[in-house]
Image: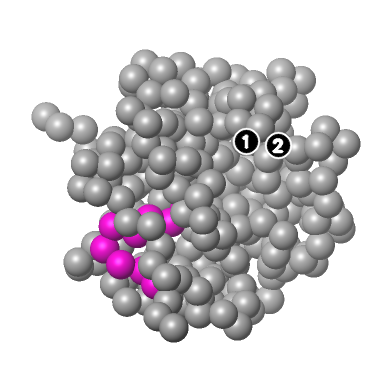
Amino acid sequence: MPLAVVDRKSRHEISLMRRAGQIVAEVHALTREALKPGVSTLDLDVIAEAHIRKSGALPTFKGYHGFPATLCTSINDEVVHGIPNAERRLQEGDVISIDVGATYKGMIADAAYTAGVGAISADCQRLLAATEESLMAAIEQMRDGRCLEDVSGAVEDVCLKYGFGLVRNYGGHAVGRQLHEEPFVHNFRTGERGPLLRPGSILAIEPMFNLGGDDVYTAGDKWTVLTCDHLPSAHFEHTVVVTEADPEILTRLRPSPA
């Protein structure tokens, strides 16, 4: 039986997602500039929401299944879905993951990064570099005729190379008209080739590596996911479209038109 194909978006839909992706990338740039000791995660959220709305878009996460904020801000042993808070202030040596989505004229882009606050440990530097490397390796698999398993396997290969813990309970997804579309994108091989990628197929790929073990749990707020051994975690994500040529990262910052 021929493999299914990951849903393909039209040229018009992709152009809207390209704009949504630019807004997301601008939020990343603005929040990176603000990562200093003493800044609260709510401060970051205010910056993000103001920029998204000023750009004519909507903060995708706010209200999604009841999530109360524009950003997910996850510090140190928090893996994903941390909730911004006025009392949670950054400290020198922290690592923080910033995850954000923007909806522009009904189409969505979604991306995340992890960065240090001031100087961070050598172990955390290696963790962040390896996690981002795995994302880029997975993006390289976003080509016409490849399968979902190729994308997942690329993430797993990099994690195995460096020996970090691999978060298996969470992963990427198709995206576009909805934030979370099928298929789910595992960060490891499942033994199933999965649907095919064709030009117009779009995935949000999001590897998460832990400095320690694989295991995670959800906090009492029912959102924040943490490592069980309380060692730091890293999370990187881009929204990527398959084209007739190279994969296009829709959430990469592009120069503004002159």
Is residue 90 shown left or right of residue 153?
right
The x, y position of residue 200, in whole percent, is 28, 57
Residue ID at (72%, 60%): 169
Q: Amino acid at mark 1?
A: Cys
Residue ID at (66%, 24%): 68
**Is 254 situated above or below 5?**
above
Q: Is residue 258 magenta?
A: no
Q: Which residue is mark 2?
A: 82
Query: Which residues are drawn in magenta?
Result: 196-204
Q: Which residue is mark 1?
A: 72
Identify the disc placed on residue 252: none
Residues at marks 2 and 1 touching, judged by CB atoms closer than 8 Å: yes
Q: Foreground: 180 or 61?
A: 180
The x, y position of residue 129, in whole percent, is 54, 62
**Mark 1 secondary-structure assignment:** strand
Observer able to see residue 254: no
